[in-house]
Structures are given as C-alpha cells and as structure tokens.
Image: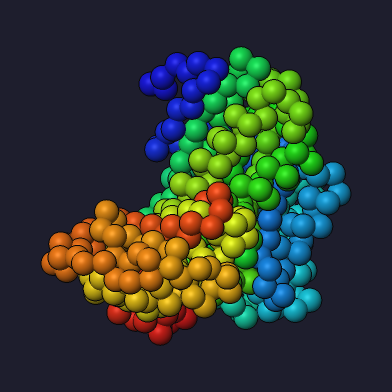
Amino acid sequence: MIPTISNNEMVILDHGSVTLPKGFKAGGIHCGLKKNSNLDLGYIVSEVPAAAAGVYTTNVFQAAPLLVTQESIAKEKKIQAIIVNSGNANSCTGEQGIQDAYEIQKQFANELGIKEHYVAVTSTGVIGELLPMEKVTSGIKQILAKDNDGENKFMQAILTTDLALKHIGVQIKVDGKTISIGGAAKGSGMIHPNMATMLGFVTTDANIEQESLLKALKDVTNQTFNMITVDGDTSTNDMVLVMANGMAGNDSLTTEHPDWGIFVNGLKVVCEELAKKIAKDGEGATKLIEVQVNGANNLSEARAVGKSIISSNLVKTAIYGTDPNWGRIITAIGYSGVPVEPNLVKVSIGSFVVFEGGLPCPIIEEEVKAYLEQDYIQIYVELNQGEYSVAAWGCDLTYDYIKINASYRS
C-alpha cells in the first residue's frame, strides 16, 4: 500500500519503476539476440503521446538508434513508446544500421497503431554487428502478448553485463495532485559520462511543457549521471529518455510554476538513485564509492575534483585492496586541473581524517582498513576555497573487471 503524502513530502518507492506513473505499461521478451535464453527485447508504452526529452552520448560515433530517436523527438517533441534491444548495439553499422533502426520503429508503431515518429528506438550490446532483423521482427510481433508484460521483464530485457536490476520510483504533490516519477536503467561497463553513459528510462504522469522537461533533465543529469564513472569509457549508444504523459492532471508545469522545485527534486532523486545503482553494479565491482567535494570556488571545479578522484584507477584499486593510501587521492586532486591551495585541503576516508594542512594526519591504519572492507565507502574532500559542493560516485576496480571485458564478445 502506498502511503498518503502531503504537499511538502516525497515518498520514495524502492519497488517503483517505469510503470509506477499512470498510463504506462512495459514488458520484455527473448527474441534470440542473446546466445542464452535471457530476455533481450523490451518496451515501454504510454496510453497517450507524452512530452519527451533526451540526453545523449557525447561520443562522436553515435549509434543508429540514437540518430533515429533524436530525429523522431524533434518532429513533435513527443513520443508514445520506446523499443529497446540488448545484445547488439547497432553501432558502426553504416546505412544498413540506420535503415534497420527505422524498420524497428515502423514495425513497433504498426503493432501499436501509432505514428512512426512516436516510437523511440534504443540498443545496447556488441558494437559493429548488424542486427539479425528476422529475429527482431519476430520478437516485435510477439512482444505485446499479455504474458510478456511487466516492468521486471522490461528491466531484464535491457541488461547486458549487469548483475542487478536498477529501478526506483517517487511520488510528490503538484497542485494538490499526486505525481509519480519512475525510472529504470542499465549500465555496468563503459561508464564514464559526459552526458549519460548508459541507458536510462524515466516516466512520469506529470503534465509538463517539453522545453521545461528538457531543461530539468539536463540540469539533473549534470548532477547525477554525469557524476558517475566505472571505467573511464564513454559508449556509442547511451542515452536517458524521459516521457511525461500528463495523466496526473496537474496544471502544466513550467519553470515559473510554484511547484517546479518539487518536481525537479523528485526527478533528481530518481536519477541519482539510478546513477548510484549503476556505479555500484560496475563490472566486477565489490564496493560503491562516494566522493563528496566541499568548499570549491564553483560547480565546475567541484565536479572536476570529484570526477578526477572517482576516475583514478589507483584510487579504485587501493579501495578494492582496502589500502588507506590517501596519497592517491591527493594526487588525483592535484592533476584535476583545478587550482587548489594544498595547505587548505582536508581529506577524510569515512570519519578518518588522513590529510590536512599539507601534511598527513596520524591514523590507526587497521581501523581505516576495517572501514574500507565495507561495501559503501565515502571520501570527503574539503577545499576550503568557496561555497560549492558536489557528490560523485564510482566503484572499485577488481580482477573480475579484466576477466569480464577480456571476453565480452565471447
């Protein structure tokens, strides 16, 4: 039972996902793209066309589905459905890959009886191989069958090397109406966003202007998905899409609406939780690492320091090995490109202050090692130069990461 919420409260639903908001359904099927019997073709459908916004990988080798989806959203700023396959990225596949993405869009639109450009197409998996379209076509014809529906099947269908389903939902009040925001994502490797390096899907029944929705998504992405890293690689396929179908019946949300901040905060909670779950599920990872940077001159510098630390392979391997080697953290701060004053910097690993005033601090190494044995590690950096703060998330780097990626295609 979902608890009642008041105007100033938010309910976070760990079991929530993309079908939490009114008017959305989802599902998945195995159509044969993966070598095993795991689900590999999924969908989200709204009862009505929804305002749509997306952010996309900054890799110059953008995969065919991204190009088709961006073109489709540009036509009316709306979509009504998303079709996504895993096991094959349809990336670096030339004109044939583009035509295959259009064909998938057309076929799913026909199954739904909607405009072709109301379908967004997404793919994830191995790069450089053409889609086996006969398998995809067969799957699309079967995917809307009743026994294929359910948000869990959708979430399973989008996975590649992921070990865990990633989903969250929140409910807020806007104009006295209950607004739901749900999200699901996949991502485990090739995670180093300069936008959103994974697949993320967010749905909401809020009534919101498309331009305002896009602004909210971009702002929130910079604080969440753009602040995670697993391995420093930015993929060719990745995007975050948001659909807002307006079925909650609130007055149209814009940046001028008195409840705008409430909606943006709800969207941020969803995106942050998905981002953290991606970081935690990094390929071979055993620990989630959070870096909190405080006291920066501006957000850009705070983010640069946070991402420099969380991206450092030496920091990541030290944490895997439970080695309280604070020198690696200091080094990452030093090469971040931010003009910090070394004597003002303070670094803590958990509650243990390890560096301050330009000098190491006395610690009982066994106590810090014991802290590093936990599966959630926090690093705090005080720059003491300004008023800006950010958080960044990543994971440790393990032997298993090498094993997984040495044999990814096989």
Q: Residue at x 56, y 53 (%)?
A: 386
Choose between 179 and 164: the one closer to the eye. 179
Task: Specify the quadrant of the image occupied by residue 26.
Answer: top right
* Residue 71 picture location, percent across and down: 81, 57
* Residue 244 picture location, percent across and down: 68, 36
The chosen color scheme is rainbow
Outermost residue toward the bottom in this view: 406
Choose between 300 and 168: the one closer to the eye. 300
Outermost residue toward the right in this view: 75
Q: Residue at x 86, y 49 (%)?
A: 75
Is 368 on the left or on the right of 163, as rendered? left
* Residue 169 picture location, percent across and down: 48, 36
Is 399 on the left or on the right of 147, as rendered? left
How many numbered tags mark residues here? 0
Task: Look at the image and tell me whether residue 41 can be seen.
Answer: no
Q: Residue at x 61, y 47 (%)?
A: 220
**276, above or below 314, in the image:** above
Choose between 233 and 161: the one closer to the eye. 233
Task: Look at the image and tell me whether residue 297 can be seen.
Answer: yes
* Residue 12 picture location, percent across and down: 44, 32
Quadrant for the C terminus in the image: bottom left
Task: Specify the quadrant of the image occupied by residue 88.
Answer: bottom right
Choose between 158 and 191: the one closer to the eye. 191
Q: Residue at x 29, y 56 (%)?
A: 350
Is 316 on the left or on the right of 263, as rendered? left
Is 218 on the left or on the right of 312, as rendered? right
